[in-house]
Amino acid sequence: MINVQLLLHQRHQQRRRRRRRTTWVRDWILRRPLFGVYDQLMVELRREDPHSFKNFLRMTPAMFDELLDRLTPRLMKQDTFFRLPLEPGIKLALTLRHLASGNKYADMKFSWRVPHNTISIVIREVCQAIVDEYLDELMTCPSTPDEWQQVADKYYQKWNFPHTCGAIDGKHVACKAPPNSGSQYYNYKGFFSVILFAMVDADYKFLWADVSGVGSCSDAQIYNDRELKECIENNLIGFPDPEPLPNDNENVPYYIIGDDAFGLRPHMMKPYSRRGMDRKERIFNYRLSRARRVVENAFGILAN
């Protein structure tokens, strides 16, 4: 018993000993300004081929400059005696390229000449800075009848579907199964995921989003358990009062639209069943599908 305890103590001491660092910064990383992607390739693309620059980062040089200008105060670090911090520009470009390509940190470190452990910190930092800077400006849910009326008017003008205050749907985002979660995150498509559940306006803009759903849940289950359903049904978010549809005289409430997975309610419009439809019902389903696909397209744009 004493020998076992001694052996465990020796192993613990070995783990605590740190291997002496042989180099502080590798030489090839120090040559980043001469051969790195940000200082060389991106400069060439900006100057010679803006179309390829957009393909590389999924945004134009002008949009990149605007984004960088707004995020610089959040990404700037103080200089120290040990080393110079990464510029906000390379942090932003590296993050955008990772989001656009999905490349692994270990693959990106050689071309960008930034260590993979630093990349893992930088990407989280930049994503959080983007959220903090733009969330209140670009993703604000309407709260007054006039604001919801503007959303409904755009749906009618663009997609020929009146009284629509938003389209809802869920998208599975692949993830690793959390420890001890069993099949909770395993979805019907055959992989582990969390669900991005969102409501989108007629211009593909997200009005409301929830990312707490697990892969085994259905879209209807998530909607029924979230505060959005309660707020809409109890009129806590300011939907306009019921009004007649165009060329009609009977009041109809304003509503959101979804696919066949959701239940039909006064404030939820869904398509007719696919069996035994007459011509008017098929036309209705076509128009509702054309308006509802806005949320599908928004997910597609986000995934790209």
Image (cartoon, grey):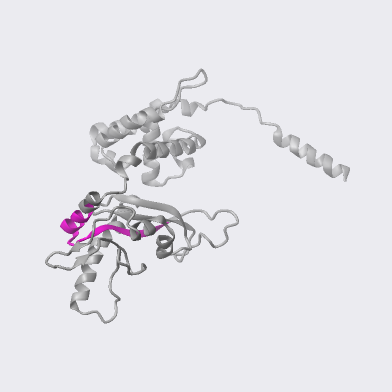
Residue 168's x, y, as percent?
A: 33, 59
Query: Does residue 129 appear left or right of residue 61 in this picture?
Result: right
Seen in the picture, residue 143 relative to 31 is either above or below; the reply is below
Q: Identify the residue shown where x is 48% and y is 63%.
A: 216
Q: Is residue 13 visible?
A: yes
Q: Identify the residue shown where x is 57% and y is 26%.
A: 23
Q: Is residue 304 visible?
A: no
Q: Quadrant of residue 161?
A: bottom left
Residue 200's x, y, as percent?
A: 30, 54
Query: Does residue 26 appear left or right of residue 301 in this picture?
Result: right
| Magenta highlight range | 151-172
Residue toward you, 285 or 110: 285
Query: Does residue 140 appear left or right of residue 111 in this picture?
Result: left
Q: Is residue 162 magenta?
A: yes
Q: Quadrant of residue 267?
A: bottom left
Q: Is residue 180 magenta?
A: no
Residue toward you, 95 or 196: 196
Residue 214's x, y, as percent?
A: 48, 58
Q: Identify the residue shown where x is 21% and y is 56%.
A: 152
* Residue most extreme to the top: 81
Residue 238's x, y, as percent?
A: 29, 53
Query: Does residue 158 appear left or right of residue 218 in this picture?
Result: left
